Image (spheres, rainbow, N blue to C red):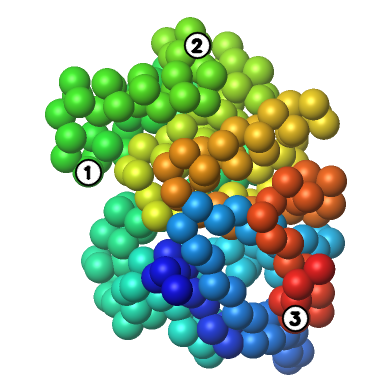
Amino acid sequence: MTQAVLEATGITKTYRETGQTLPILQGASLRVEPGEVVAILGVSGSGKSTFLQILGTLDRPDEGTLHIDGEDALAMNDGALSRLRAGKLGFVFQFHHLMPDFSAVENVAFPLLIAGSTRREALRHAHALLEEVGLGERAEHRPNELSGGERQRAALARALCGNPAVVLADEPTGNLDPATSVRLYDQLTGLAERHRQAFVIATHDMELAGRAHRRLRLSQGILEAC
């Protein structure tokens, strides 16, 4: 058996407010292999985003373990977690979060510049990623000059810029029309096959989730195969 790029076991999360206890995750476990695309289904409010935030080390569980590419994420301090996220994880959200005053290629190159790459090397790599997601000819355009699908593809290229072991995508097609959504999912699965990068995608769209290698459903805090 190959080493999992992400392995979460017994993840539990409970929110407490106004004297009430609200269980969000109840012992959720997930193992993801290199190159695997996993879709997590569930209605709004089912805990999908919370689970992805925990997998991405942006939130901590009340109980459970989390290993990313063999490293114990929950045993790390903030500095080590920041380095882990920068080196092992990529993120794509429903809203692209591109910087409006920068071109697509500058947006993609930005994390590499922060990590210490030279501007020339960062832009070279960013151009290559934009070509791979079909945006080579739009590289110099700013976000307001791109369509919704193009902005999400630029966000996908940015998520891939550090060559992460796993990309976490939270409703990445939530603001896209059906045809554009299908094209984005095709690109996700293609990237997984070519680069052996894993994708964990939270979505409520069963048709699009059908393109994943494996589907799980989160309901009432319980994560189960579907």
The quadrant where residue 30 appears = bottom right
**How far, Cα to Cα, is label 3 from label 2?**
42 Å
Which residue position is annotated with label 3?
222
Q: Are marks 1 and 3 in contact (CB under 8 Å)?
A: no
Residue situated furthest front in the rendering:
1
Please give left or right for residue 99 compared with residue 40 in the image.
Answer: left
Considering only vertical position in the picture, is 57 above or below 141? below
Which residue position is annotated with label 1?
115
Q: Are marks 3 and 2 in contact (CB under 8 Å)?
A: no
Query: Which residue is pictured at 44% across the width and 49% down the height?
Result: 196
Instruction: Give the mark count.
Output: 3
Query: Which residue is pictured at 40% across the width and 70% down the height?
Result: 3
Residue 189 place in picture, x, y as percent: 60, 42
Query: Which residue is pictured at 30% across the width and 27% down the height?
Result: 125
Residue 188 place in picture, x, y as percent: 59, 40
Query: Which residue is pictured at 51% across the width and 34% down the height?
Result: 155
Say the numbered circle drawn on residue 53: none
